[in-house]
Amino acid sequence: MVNRQTPSLSFEVFPPNPAVGNEKILQALKEMQDIAPHFISVTASNNKFNIEETTVRLADFIYNDLKIPTIAHLPAVYLTKDRVSHTLQALDRVGVHSVLALRGDIFPDVAPKDDFRYATDLIAYIKEEAPHFDIIGACYPEGHPDSPNQISDIQNLKKKVDAGCSSLVTQLFFDNERFYDFQDKCTLAGIEVPIHAGIMPILNRNQALRLLKTCENIKLPRKFRAILDKYEHDPESLRAAGLAYAIDQIVDLVTHDAAGIHLYTMNNSATARHIYQATHTFFDK
Ligand code: FAD
């Protein structure tokens, strides 16, 4: 689904807390429909919410009601093989046959289950249990935080791809040079599947602060830091500069033949539309 000659534009959305309800996200998704993204991926909670009631339900809506190709995320470190089989069957029933196979973060106070230590274990299991599924993997242009160095991370990524990934989606990044360097290293390591670049537009101060806290390994270029500093207390300018920065990144990436852009929309259809309007000429050809 995600292997193409021209770059693809795809979106990521997340299911809201079930207590909040789906009304807002369903509306946002309807507003994204006429952009016709190449696919939408739906994140999944790692340990907090039931994946069938959240991710699978939303994936069902995107795939069957909006007719947009859909990828369901599946973090497995806190799942048993039975639970994973159950989720794959639920996806099968609604016709969604693409999975972003993930380990998921390990929380220090919650012991992992024994069945899936790494994403590679999950991929091997899906290949056996449901070989008709398309499997996508996650990757980290600036290294995964658990890895001692980028070399071992890329060696593990090679094992993951060999286990059965048809493509990869990156963690968000703000420095395209890091992405190009990573791509080159993947090629040297024999990783030949398409790599979709994860781009997150920064739209407000809280989002920026959260990001700075959780993504210590991600380089923030001087140009990006200047935006955060200068417009910290000017929400309108911060949003405008954040969107412009993301658009600039995307133009550079497609010019350098990136396989695709995966936009972390934060469920915001106005953001997706704004970026699409500024860049659609690169994706529609
Ligand atoms: P893995 O590929 O298993 O890698 C984890 C670490 O283990 C790495 O350091 C790797 O180098 C190392 N490793 C891998 N294989 C081996 C091996 N055989 N031997 C030794 N070391 C090994 N999380 C969610 O909870 N829900 C989501 O919906 C979600 N969506 C995401 C989408 C994208 C595009 C990305 C990039 C991340 C997403 N995450 C999500 C976060 C992800 O779950 C975490 O980053 C997690 O810590 C790693 O997951 P992984 O599948 O990349 O792990």
Image (cartoon, helix red, strand yellow):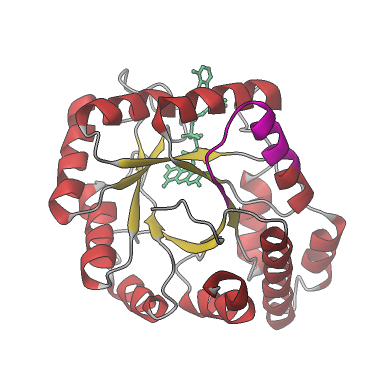
Image height of 1 relative to 136, above or below: below
Q: Residue furthest top?
A: 114
* Image-based side of 218 in relation to 139, left or right: right
* Image-based side of 156 in relation to 182, left or right: left
Taking the spot 65% from the left edge, 45% from the top edge, the residue there is 215
Whether 259 is among the magenta residues is no
Whether 187 is among the magenta residues is yes
The magenta stretch spans which residues?
181-196
Image height of 189 relative to 132, above or below: above
* Image-based side of 162 in relation to 206, left or right: left
Taking the spot 36% from the left edge, 73% from the top edge, the residue there is 29
Q: How many marks?
A: 0
Image coordinates for residue 21, horizontal then vertical, percent: 27, 67
Taking the spot 21% from the left edge, 40% from the top edge, the residue there is 88
Which image quadrant is residue 102 in?
top left
Image coordinates for residue 189, horizontal then vertical, percent: 64, 26
* Image-based side of 75 in relation to 153, left or right: left
Which image quadrant is residue 99 in?
top left
Image coordinates for residue 201, horizontal then vertical, percent: 63, 66
Q: Is residue 149 visible?
A: no
Image height of 21 relative to 157, above or below: below
Quarter holding the C terminus is bottom right
Image height of 21 relative to 104, above or below: below
Q: Is residue 31 visible?
A: yes
Front-most of 156 and 207?
156
Taking the spot 52% from the left edge, 39% from the top edge, the residue there is 193
